[in-house]
């Protein structure tokens, strides 16, 4: 009898283990199914974007208030009335944004009583020279202008738009030197001067020059003269001088030009005299 009960108990336990094993498998699947809908498990990202990280949801009511723009920046084109002040006693911004008027500022008014000296022109040549600064070339060579014109009369110029060919240069040089050599002009000096004052007029060029500058002399509020601050160089004729007097009137003046063998002072101003 005892053995029969042991056999019965063993059979019962075995049956329970078989049934329990099936229930355990079923429970595991049930947990997996419940876990998909359980809020403790992260949900997959929504289609078209990712989930917002924790803490980046909608701001609280008081946080939204802090993010709103201040009235001063919400309407950049609205300028306060003149003399008004911004928040905290700060000066109100000027119209246009960065502390200044809109558009370009008007030029500063010229101070009353300011005197100016305008020097213009002075590069005209004699029509017989066809645009060549003969007066400067002759002075640099140390010969009278008419002597150089005589020497140049035997030259067949290539034109201001191009240089001469080697053959043309040789013939022209011989014609020039036949007249200039008796005055002590060497071939090297002739080349130096010719190259210094050579220019291309067809391209709007001008021979080498330095503009002159001057300033007015005022005594007791009256214009009394003109002082040269830079004599300049390269003037082939006297430039036009106009001086603005303290009372605003324009006064003409006459310039005197000097010609020397030095390139730095050849065609420079030596004096400026007011016209009566």
Image (cartoon, rainbow, N blue to C red):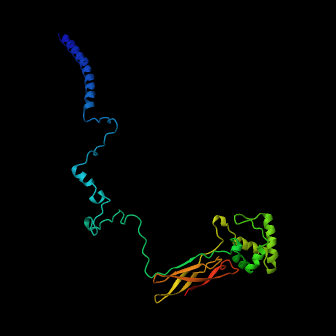
* Residue shown at the point (42%, 65%) measured from the top left: 104
Residue 32 picture quarter: top left
Image location of residue 147, percent across then percent down: 76, 79
Camera-side residue of 205 and 210: 205
Q: Give the x, y percent position of residue 124.
A: 64, 74
Q: Position of 205 compared to 65: left or right? A: right
Q: Quadrant of the N terminus?
A: top left
Q: Is residue 88 above or below residue 24?
A: below
Vertical placement of residue 108 versus 79, above or below: below
Q: Residue 10: name its quadrant.
A: top left
Q: Nearer the viewer, residue 216 or 77?
A: 216
Left or right side of 260 for 104: left
* Percent position of residue 193, x then y: 72, 74
Q: Is residue 152 above or below residue 4?
A: below
Q: Which residue appears at 43% of the width and 81% of the height?
A: 112
151 with respect to 25 (left or right) = right
State the count of labels: 0
252 or 178, which is in the foreground? 252
């Amino acid at each position: 009898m005892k053995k029969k009960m042991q056999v019965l108990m063993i059979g019962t336990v075995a049956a329970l283990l078989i049934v329990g094993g099936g229930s355990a498998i079923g429970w595991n699947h049930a947990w997996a199914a419940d876990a998909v809908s359980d809020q403790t498990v992260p949900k997959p990202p929504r289609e078209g974007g990712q989930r917002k990280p924790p803490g980046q949801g909608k701001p609280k009511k008081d946080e939204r208030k802090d993010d709103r723009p201040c009235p001063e920046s919400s309407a950049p084109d609205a300028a306060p009335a003149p003399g008004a002040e911004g928040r905290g006693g700060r000066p109100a911004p000027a119209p246009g944004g960065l502390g200044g008027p809109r558009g370009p500022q008007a030029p500063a008014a010229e101070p009353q009583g300011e005197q100016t000296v305008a020097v213009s022109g002075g590069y005209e040549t004699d029509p017989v020279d066809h645009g060549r600064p003969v007066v400067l070339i002759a002075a640099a060579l140390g010969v009278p202008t008419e002597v150089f014109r005589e020497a140049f009369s035997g030259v067949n110029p290539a034109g201001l738009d191009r240089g001469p060919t080697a053959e043309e240069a040789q013939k022209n040089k011989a014609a020039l030197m036949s007249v200039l050599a008796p005055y002590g002009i060497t071939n090297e000096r002739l080349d130096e001067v010719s190259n210094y004052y050579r220019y291309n007029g067809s391209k709007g060029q001008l021979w080498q020059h330095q503009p002159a500058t001057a300033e007015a002399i005022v005594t007791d509020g009256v214009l009394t003269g003109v002082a040269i601050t830079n004599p300049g160089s390269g003037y082939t004729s006297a430039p036009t001088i106009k001086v603005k007097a303290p009372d605003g009137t324009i006064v003409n003046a006459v310039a005197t030009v000097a010609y020397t063998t030095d390139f730095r002072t050849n065609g420079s101003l030596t004096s400026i005299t007011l016209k009566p």
